[in-house]
Amino acid sequence: MAYHIDTGLIKEKFKVDCECPLCEIQKIVEEQFLHEFLNDAVMEENTRITVGKKGFCSRHFDMLFTRQNKLSVALQIGTRAEVLQNYMGEIKSAKQAKKLAEQIDDASKRCVICSLTEDSMVKYYKTIAQMFTKEKDFFKSIISSKGFCLHHYAELLRYSSFAGFMKDEYVSVLSSTQNRNFNRLSSELKTFCDKHDYRRALEPLGDAETALPRMRIKLYGEKIE
């Protein structure tokens, strides 16, 4: 494959019984970056410069902080704090305040781990499209999956042109798989709601019992902690 991505991981996660195999892949990608920023990367000058410029979002800060190496986190946050000190000067006018507010807001939206994770995931989206074209039976893995969360479905569609001459067939398989599974889950959620009618209290719930948390994954992606 052109993007040097572990196609074995893709095949493995497309076989997992889950609402989004891309969420499963992202958990592994994100974990790799978390490990790096808690270990050797913290001592690299380029890493410290990048962390200084971007910092961490609150979610990734919390994920780093809950792990054992607090010193690594403190060193990197200290570097970030030095950069943010530039925004802490005296403000002398409302115009200056408005401009500074926009700069602070923009700085707060950045996260080095989010950026690295998304860059890596783009390679997976492209590789999956290529695999559809180059690997004879891969389309069966897509069809037999339970579809994707909305974010990852949109990203797969965004990079569907990387399926080349089979891009139309690719988006057809993606959309039919997503539509079928979204309808499946919606039906299970309706069953869950109907079960709360006393007239259906004795009917078995089956898979509908977990429909709500699984719909949460479908709509927002799997919560990664």
Image (cartoon, rainbow, N blue to C red):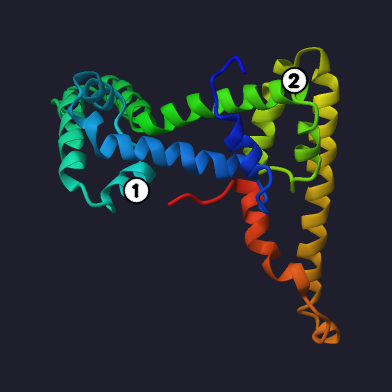
> Could you say which is closer to the camera, residue 121 or residue 50?
121
Residue 86: quarter of image: top left
Residue ID at (75%, 39%)? 141
Three-letter amino acid code at the position of disc 1: Met
> Upstream in the sequence, badge 2 or badge 1?
1
Residue ID at (84%, 20%)? 168
Query: Label 2: which residue?
Result: 134
> Could you say which is closer to the camera, residue 69 or residue 104?
69
Residue ID at (76%, 13%)? 164
Residue 111 in sight in this render? no
Where does the image place residue 41, in percent across and percent down from the top left? Answer: 25, 29
Element under disc 1 = helix
Give the spatial CA distance, label 2 vs label 1: 38 Å
Query: Label 1: which residue?
Result: 63
| Circle 1 residues within 10 Å: few <14, some 14–19, many ≥20 | some
Instruction: Please state if 206 lies on the left or on the right of 122 as rendered.
Output: right
Residue 40: quarter of image: top left
Where does the image place residue 29, in percent across and percent down from the top left? Answer: 47, 36
Q: Quadrant of the N terminus?
A: top right
